[in-house]
Image (spheres, rainbow, N blue to C red):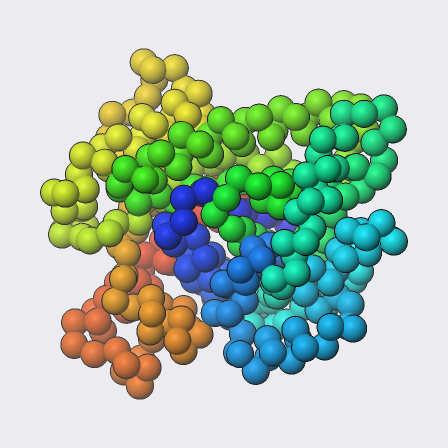
């Protein structure tokens, strides 16, 4: 099993949309795929499951294991370990463990636990800190998952730090704009600090077997607008800066070795068309973009955009599989 998180503390760069569409494409390509909704806003759950299903899941508050928060509630309260997850089948070979707004209540326990992982008596701190990692492993085993996709929120808080412990690799979605560049300047140094702290903690008390490295493996550029598959002029200057900022802030590549262009950067997984007109339709009918039909409201030139989306997500998913070795 391999796990991947699409992570950036800048919101609006398409993390959830990418996660949902990549998951469906991976399942189509024969991978048993699992989505873990580690974002208390539950956006991917709202796309993958009907409102009726989510209402029923959330209303049955006494049932353990039906959401991420309920799986780790005993850990949060210091009353026990994680509960066996009860996954929802979203499509053939695709499952999801739904999110829950109550997951945000775990943030304080995770922040306190991280501050104690270097202590000599850190058993409780490690138990809390690794809860989301252990939940990911247990959920993956329950369905024999080949690929686990983690959906996380756009912040650098304790919850995301713990969630990334369940990721083999991290890919950063960015847009060719000033705010995404600033996001990279925050994400890179923060992730390095987290990894260093975690490595030091494990020297004292090793975490669960199969601990993940949450290694930054690349970035995906989502274009705001496109013309002949290149950003329009207003975004060209920002796109040109992405490789340098990624290599400097995320990878700490020496300046002489940094690529000058996105097209020459092996860490650029892809430059993806935004498909802005299709995203709201796809979310409304809870389908991947590349499955939209005329009956879903697609018309005119959008039909060609749907076909283009299928090609681009097939290629993107193939590249991510190669990156992860699956």
The image quadrant that residue 105 belongs to is: bottom right
Residue at left offset 83%, top offset 31%: 122
| Residue 113 visible in this rendered orientation of the protein | yes
Q: 213 or 80, which is in the foreground? A: 80
Residue at left offset 54%, top offset 62%: 42
In-image side of 14 versus 226 (left or right): right
| Residue 317 visible in this rendered orientation of the protein | no
Query: For the view shown, which residue lies furthest in the bottom direction?
Result: 295
Residue at left offset 58%, top offset 57%: 40
Q: With respect to residue 196, does 145 lie above or below?
A: below
Find residue 54 and report its horizontal and vertical position in percent: 59, 75
In-image side of 230 versus 323 (left or right): left
Q: 77 or 28, which is in the foreground? A: 77
Q: With respect to residue 246, does 51 lie above or below?
A: below
Residue at left offset 29%, top offset 68%: 278
In-image side of 218 versus 298 (left or right): right
The image quadrant that residue 181 belongs to is: top left
Find residue 17 and report its horizontal and vertical position in percent: 41, 60
How many circles with numbers are drawn on the protein? 0
Q: With respect to residue 165, does 13 lie above or below?
A: below
Find residue 179 and report its horizontal and vertical position in percent: 32, 40
Q: 195 or 145, which is in the foreground? A: 195
Find residue 294 and report its horizontal and vertical position in percent: 27, 82
Q: 2 or 69, which is in the foreground? A: 69
In-image side of 53 versus 7 (left or right): right
The image quadrant that residue 100 belongs to is: bottom right
Q: With respect to residue 293, does 124 lie above or below?
A: above
């Amino acid at each position: 099993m391999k796990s991947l998180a699409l992570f950036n503390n800048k919101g609006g760069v398409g993390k959830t949309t990418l996660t949902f569409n990549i998951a469906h494409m991976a399942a189509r390509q024969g991978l048993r795929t699992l989505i873990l909704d580690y974002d208390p806003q539950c956006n991917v759950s709202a796309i993958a499951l009907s409102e009726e299903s989510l209402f029923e899941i959330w209303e049955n508050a006494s049932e353990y294991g039906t959401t991420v928060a309920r799986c780790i509630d005993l850990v949060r309260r210091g009353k026990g370990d994680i509960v066996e997850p009860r996954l929802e089948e979203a499509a053939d070979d695709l499952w999801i463990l739904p999110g829950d707004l109550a997951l945000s209540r775990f943030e304080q326990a995770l922040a306190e636990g991280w501050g104690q992982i270097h202590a000599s008596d850190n058993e409780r701190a490690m138990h809390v800190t690794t809860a989301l990692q252990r939940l990911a492993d247990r959920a993956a085993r329950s369905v024999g998952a080949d690929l686990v996709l983690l959906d996380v929120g756009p912040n650098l808080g304790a919850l995301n730090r713990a969630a990334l412990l369940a990721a083999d690799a991290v890919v950063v979605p960015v847009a060719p704009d000033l705010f995404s560049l600033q996001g990279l300047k925050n994400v890179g140094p923060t992730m390095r600090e987290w990894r260093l702290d975690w490595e030091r903690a494990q020297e004292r008390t090793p975490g669960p077997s199969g601990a993940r490295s949450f290694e930054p493996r690349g970035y995906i550029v989502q274009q705001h607008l496109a013309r002949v598959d290149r950003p329009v002029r207003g975004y060209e200057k920002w796109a040109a800066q992405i490789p340098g900022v990624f290599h400097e802030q995320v990878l700490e590549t020496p300046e002489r070795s940094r690529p000058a262009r996105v097209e020459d950067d092996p860490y650029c997984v892809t430059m993806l068309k935004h498909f802005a007109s299709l995203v709201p339709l796809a979310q409304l009918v809870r389908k991947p973009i590349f499955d939209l039909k005329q009956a879903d409201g697609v018309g005119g030139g959008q039909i060609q955009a749907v076909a283009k989306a299928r090609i681009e997500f097939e290629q993107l998913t193939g590249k991510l599989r190669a990156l992860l070795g699956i």
